[in-house]
């Protein structure tokens, strides 16, 4: 499995989203090396990102707007 982006043009937006979610969760994610973070911290960021993306897609499919 690779970390290659399906839509390379979205890289900047995805990076910004990752840092936004990390900030919301209180995870001190920074650009560059983050080996000092636990796997639970990193996993919480990824998990929350997926949760928010699914929620946004469900809203779009239902025809509603984000709140």
Image (tube, helix red, strand yellow):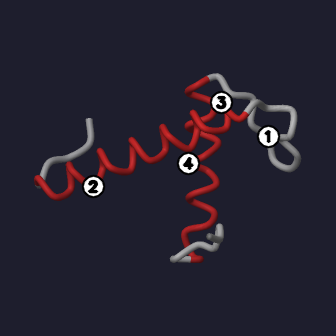
| Spot occupied by residue 62 in the image (x, y as percentages of width and height) | 11, 53
| Distance between the alpha carbons at the discs numbered 1 and 3 | 16 Å
Residue 10 appears left or right of 23? left
Q: Position of residue 48 (x, y in %)?
A: 48, 37
Q: How many marks?
A: 4
Q: Where on the picture, by quarter, is residue 55? A: top left
Q: Residue furthest left?
A: 62
Q: Nearer the viewer, mark 4 or mark 3?
A: 3
Front residue of this view, candidates 40 and 24: 40
Residue wearing tag 3: 40
CA neighbours of label 4 inside 10 A, class few (<14), some (14 to 19), many (20+):
some
Would residue 12 appear left or right of 29 to someone viewing this image? left
Residue 66: which numbered mark, if any?
Answer: none
Residue at 63% x, 63% y is 12
- Asked if the residue at tag 4 contacts the one at tag 2, i.e. Cβ–Cβ closer than 8 Å, the answer is no
Contact between marks 4 and 3 (CB within 8 A): the answer is no
Q: Disc 4 marks which residue?
A: 17
User: Which corner quadrant of the image does residue 24 belong to?
Assistant: top right
């Amino acid at each position: 499995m690779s970390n290659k982006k399906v839509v390379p043009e979205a890289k900047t937006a995805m990076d910004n989203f990752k840092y936004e979610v990390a900030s919301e969760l209180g995870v001190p994610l920074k650009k560059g090396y983050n080996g000092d973070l636990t796997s639970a911290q990193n996993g919480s960021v990824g998990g929350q990102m997926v949760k928010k993306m699914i929620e946004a897609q469900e809203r779009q499919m239902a025809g509603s707007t984000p709140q």
